[in-house]
Image (cartoon, grey):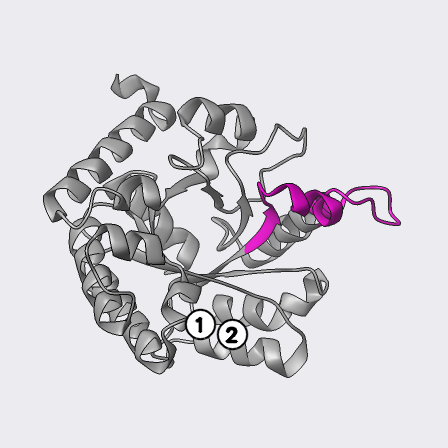
Amino acid sequence: MTFGERLQEAVRARGRFCVGIDPHPELLHSWGLPDNATGLERFARIAVEAVGGEVAVVKPQSAFFERHGSRGVAVLERTLAAAREAGALVLLDAKRGDIGSTMQAYADAYVDTSSPLCADAVTATPYAGYESLRPVLDTALAHGNGVFVVTLTSNPQGHEIQRARTAAGGTVAETILRRVRETNAAAGLPGSIGCVVGATIAPTGYDLDVGGPILAPGVGAQGAGPDDVRRVFGPALPAVLPSSSRWILRHGPDIRAIKDATRQAVRVFALLFYPESR
């Protein structure tokens, strides 16, 4: 099955919600864990045990594992495997972007099934040009995996690039949306290539329907709720995958509390996507 097909099955079974596993130093401290590889491993194990069986997608943030060196990367490998064993799809939030053989090496690491770091999908940045992503797009599709292309982020600094006008007259973000739409149309629907669009941005007026999933970070701790998701994404709402990390993980290290918060979030967003369930 393609990633797009697996994602459709997962959201039908578990609802349309993603939990990020971000072992931020402040979260480690609040959980009473040391900011080292030992604390990282304990944090990741608790997080996966609490959410891995509850949500469609789990999203480890690679940087918070990498900061602990080789031992942290080893924990990341085990976290990917454990989340899959719990039945969740794994989106590795690595946001890699480069050209040529370097981009191919990232693709081999993150979406080639022979790699111990292979995930079901990976985030990537397109600002060396959309075609610079071709190695990761092609490798992901060849292995039945996916890519989420960073498109519209909520940080104010993103506007200077993402909303900049191209020679063709549209914005950079509109160009990325169009190219992702074309990639999915060529590969077949449901698309396995998605976009990352922050849930806290103002409505853009852009056509956000790319024939694939839309990751919407910013839910919860960053302020976005169901009404914001509806307002931002409009007609593209059926493709949106809301994502939260701190909003859920602040309930740790109590596994039951994290699990309860996760189930509540899934129920809240079910009312957005399936209003007939009220």
Q: Which quarter of the rendering shows the N terminus?
A: bottom left
Residue 83: image location, x then y, percent: 24, 61
Q: Residue at x 79, y 45 (%)?
A: 164
Q: Residue at x 73, y 62 (%)?
A: 129
**Which stretch appears magenta?**
149-175
> Which corner quadrant of the image does residue 60 belong to?
bottom left
- Rate crowding at label 1 as few (under 14), some (14 to 19) or many (20 or more) other CA atoms within 10 Å: many
Up-down: is 34 above or below 211?
below
Q: Which quarter of the rendering shows the C terminus?
A: top left
Q: Are marks 1 and 2 in contact (CB under 8 Å)?
A: yes
Residue 157: image location, x then y, percent: 67, 46
Find out whether residue 12 is within the magenta segment: no
Up-down: is 78 above or below 270?
below
Up-down: is 123 above or below 190?
below
- Rate crowding at label 2 as few (under 14), some (14 to 19) or many (20 or more) other CA atoms within 10 Å: many
Whole-number angstrom distance, CA of label 1 to CA of label 2 = 5 Å
Find out whether residue 160 is within the magenta segment: yes
**Residue 172 left/right relative to 143:** right
Residue type at mark 2 is Ala
Q: Give the residue pinned by disc 2.
A: 107
> Which corner quadrant of the image does residue 40 belong to?
bottom left
So how many labels did they put on this image? Answer: 2
**Nearer to the camera, 30 or 211:** 30
Classify mark 2: helix, strand or loop: helix
Tell me if I can see residue 157 in this picture.
Answer: yes
Q: Residue at x 29, y 48 (%)?
A: 56
Identify the mark at residue 199; answer none if there is no mark.
none
**Nearer to the camera, 206 or 164:** 164
Tell me if I can see residue 22 in this picture.
Answer: no
Identify the mark at residue 110; answer none if there is no mark.
1
Residue type at mark 1 is Tyr
